[in-house]
Structure formats: C-alpha cells, structure tokens
Image (cartoon, rainbow, N blue to C red):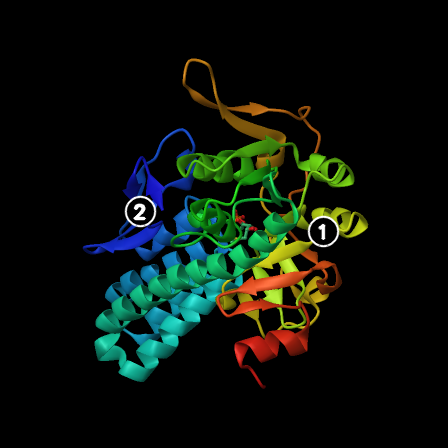
Amino acid sequence: MRVAGEHHRTVRLAGDVVRVIDQRLLPWRFEFLDLASVDAAAHAIREMAVRGAGCIGATAGFAMTLAAREADSWRELEKLAGLLKATRPTAVNLAWAVDRQIEAIREAGFDRRVETAVMTAQAIADEDAAACEAIGRHGLDIIRAIAARNPGRPVNILTHCNAGWLAFVDTGSATAPVYAAHAAGIPVHVWVDETRPRNQGARLTAWELAQEGVPHTVIADNTGGHLMQHALVDMVITGADRVSRAGDVANKIGTYLKALAARDNGVPFYVALPSSTLDWSLRDGVAETPIEQRGEGEVTHLEGVTSAGVVEKVRVVPEGSPAANYAFDVTPARLVTGLITERGVCAAEEGAIRALHGKTA
Ligand code: MRU
C-alpha cells in the first residue's frame, strides 16, 4: 500500500537482510528495520516490531533465508526454525511458513538451502499479497450489496485490531474489502476499535485508513455494542490469527464480545483471512487454540506522544495492582456470518470450508 504516495510492502529481502517496517514506531514515525540474523528476526517478532498473522508469517519465511545462511547442518537449521516458531504461539501463519520452508529445503536438498529458502520466502510473500487482493474482491461484493440496500449513505463497517496491510505483506485482510469499496467509489466509513492493550486499531488501522483517505472514526473498545443497538453499524469485518476447521476464529482479544453484540443486534459478522490462517488440525478452536499471554506492562502502561512530540509511556494502573494480558480470544463459528478467503465467501462450518478449499482429508 501507499505511504505518502509511495508503494511499500511490510517485509522484503534487501540484499542479505530482511527489511521490515518497524510497527512499534507508528503512527509517529515511519521507519524500516533491517534484520540481519535469525536472532534479530525472532526478537522483532516477539517484541512486535512486526506483527499481524500474515506479516509475521512472511517475516518468518524471509528469516528462514537467514537461517539457511547461518546453519551448516540440518540440526542447526531445525534449531533456528524452532526458535522462530517459538516467538509467538497463536497466529498459525508463522509456524505454517517455517514448516513450508523446511519442507521445501528437504525436497531440494541441504546444499541448495539458501536459494530454495529465498525462492520459497518470496513465494510466501507474493501469495499473501495476492490472497489479500482476492479477499478484497470477494468482500467488495458484500459491501456493494449492503450499499445497494441503503442508497445515499455510507456503509458503516466496524473492525477490531489491525488486519490491514501492516498485518500482512500488502493490502490486508479485513480492510481489503474496505479499500476495494473505497476505490470503487462506494461510500464507506470505518469504526476503528482502539484495541487495548497495544492499541493496534488506534495506532495502526487509523493511520492506514488515513493514508488511503478512507473516512473513519476511532472508538473506545466498549463502544461497538452501543453503536450496533442504534443501527450505526452495517457489518463487522475482522481478521483472524487462526481458524479451526470448524470455523472457530482466534483473533485479537475483544473480538468475541463484538461477535456477541453483532449477533444480538442482527449485524453481519464477517471474518477475512487467507487460507494460510486455516488450521486443519484444530476442530474446537475454543478448547484447542494456544492463547498467547503477554507481559502485564502492556496493560498497566500506555504509550503516546506528548504535545512536544516526545513519545512516552505512562502508567495508568495503581502501583502494585497486578494485570493480566490475554492477547487473543476465540469466537465460536456459530457467531460468524461468513469467512472471506481468497477462494470466496463460505459459511464458518467444516463442510463449507472444506468444499471451498478443496480439502477432503
Ligand atoms: O498481536 P498482533 O497485533 O500480532 O495481533 C494480530 C492481529 O493483528 C489481529 O488479531 C488481526 O485481526 C489478525 S492478524 C491479520
């Protein structure tokens, strides 16, 4: 997507390093971060310099090119792969990308590990970008239909967290249909959940939408239910970090509450994801999804910029009060109106997911 009119991907190879956008600095500074070792890449993923399911998958894919250069034995390569996979547990794209690299290198042979890893990483990134574009086209049909029923007013879309282009290689999942609608001249307005504790909505989604000139309003996380009760939300679109084969959706903490409010108010609740986010090994997403728990500092403190332009963290919780930081929750399939993937739109239900994705076993 474009930043100040220039097109960028979130992650790419630049010579021998992996170049990412340092998302910890947004929206205040737009800067790149060069990752020259597997350790540096693992640190960037853990500390969320790069974040979002597709983006960490692609970054891990590129980091495997560094692993291929660093490793002089299979044992070492597998150790580095394990290090990357252990950085964040919930978004399945990360493990998926690393496993795909290992499989490709196994097939090509250890001696061809570097060129194989480079080719595979590029393929993972390109496929991610293409999938997001296709998600945009399929989601556009849904927005177009809502717009046709409500002529003369914008389609109000609520989203949670950041499943925009920063969370992928390009375009994004939940915001791809929004960008497509905006480009097609359909008036849209996005309610952006701030998304505590790290505020990915307020900091990243709002910034992205502003770059693209999409009308939007940031809201406190607990506002969505009220807006839905007053017919101010036409649809919800969120992303996903892992979707079970039954259609249960793991996504940023707070997503489940939005789905409950949407169901209570008859608001369609869509989830957009590339098929690399489907975890065929999981059936019951609520019981089986590994939920990341992060440091309490993300809850006890807030980061912002002062009027003097200085980025600062302030404590918002009394000294000594403990905090819990569950990073994701799982929305049961029964609350999901439909899944939008690069293959089209299907019900959040095992048979429909399998049929759309050509998966029989
Ligand atoms: O913890 P993050 O910021 O890496 O969380 C992931 C997310 O951004 C969201 O859960 C998102 O909706 C899905 S990722 C496309």
In this view, the residue in front, 13 or 224, is 224
The answer to whether one can see residue 291 in this image is no
**Residue that lies at the very extreme toward the bottom in this rendered image:** 361
Q: Give the image location of residue 145, x and y in percent.
A: 60, 55
Residue 79 position, x and y percent, is 39, 67
Res. 74 image quadrant: bottom left
Specify the amino acid type for callout 1: Ala
Q: In this view, does 230 lie above or below 178?
A: above
Quadrant where the C terminus is found in the figure: bottom right
Please state the horizontal and vertical placement of residue 189, each as a whole percent of the image. 56, 38
Relative depth, front residue between 360 and 16: 360
In the displayed structure, does residue 279 sit left or right of residue 284? left
Q: For the residues marked 1 and 2, what is the alpha-carbon distance in whole angstroms?
A: 32 Å
Q: In this rendering, does residue 201 appear at all? A: yes
Q: Which residue lies furthest to the right in this view?
A: 264
Q: Which of marks 1 and 2 is nearer the N terminus?
A: 2
Please tell me which residue is depicted at 46% across the width and 52% down the height of the picture: 172
The CB of the residue at mark 1 lies under 8 Å from ligand 1? no
Residue at which label 2 appears: 8
Element type at mark 2 = loop
What amino acid is found at the position of numbered circle 2 in the picture? Answer: His
Give above or below for 183 relative to 97: above
- The numbered mark at residue 332 is none
Q: Quadrant of residue 49?
A: top left
| Relative to 72, 157 lies left or right | right
Binning the other alpha carbons within 10 Å of mark 2 as few (below 14), some (14 to 19) or many (20 upward) gives some
* Helix, strand or loop at mark 1: helix
Q: Residue at x 67, y 26 (%)?
A: 317
| 241 on left or right of 129 | right
Residue at label 1? 259
Q: 189 or 311, which lies in front?
A: 189
Mark 1 surroundings: few (<14), some (14-19) or many (≥20) residues within 10 A: many
